[in-house]
Image (tube, rainbow, N blue to C red):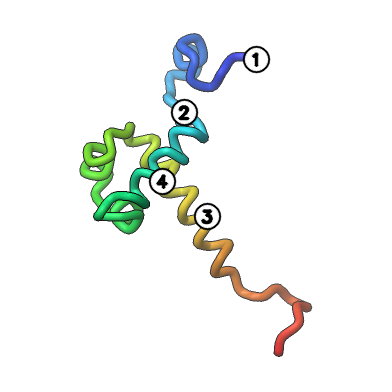
Amino acid sequence: MTPPNSASNQAVTGRYRPTPDEIKGLISRAAGHPLGTEFLLKGALDAVAATFGAHAFVVDAARDQLRTAEGAAESPPTIGSARS
């Protein structure tokens, strides 16, 4: 199987695909940065990419991952779940 970011895969698909390590690394750098993950989520795409030295596609993927994690943490109770 061809790795997702190999030169041959990019030539075939024509699209850069961020790896999980790139996404985790960006989130980690943002968490330790004075502007924090709020800037990663809401800052202008080009400013965030430049600040963290990341490709814009990595920024988008990190935003998606953070939003998904936030949504899971804030999800309402499901039908049939116990309430107190």
Dot 3 lies on which element? helix
Structural crowding at the residue carrying mark 3, measured as other residues with C-alpha within 10 Å and reported as few (<14), some (14–19) or many (≥20): few
Q: Is residue 69 left or right of residue 44?
A: right
Q: Quadrant of residue 83?
A: bottom right
Circle 4 sits on which residue?
Answer: 27
Q: Earlier in the sequence, mark 4 or mark 1?
A: 1
Q: Disc 2 residue type?
A: Arg
| 53 relative to 18 in the view: left or right | left
| Disc 2: CA contacts within 10 A as few (<14), some (14-19) or many (>=20) | some
Amino acid under disc 4: Ile
Query: Which three-letter amino acid code belongs to the residue tagged 3?
Result: Thr
Element at label 1: loop
As helix, strand or loop, the secondary structure at mark 2 comes to loop
- x and y percentages locating residue 52 in the rendered image: 28, 39
Q: Is residue 30 left or right of residue 9?
A: left
Q: Quadrant of residue 1?
A: top right
The disc, 1 or 3, on the residue closer to the chain's N-terminal end is 1
For marks 4 and 2, give the CA distance: 16 Å
Q: Nearer the viewer, mark 4 or mark 3?
A: 4
Q: In the rendered image, which residue does mark 2 sit on? A: 17
Marks 4,1: beta carbons within 8 A: no
Residue nearest the viewer, comparing 10 with 84: 84
Q: Which residue is mark 1?
A: 1
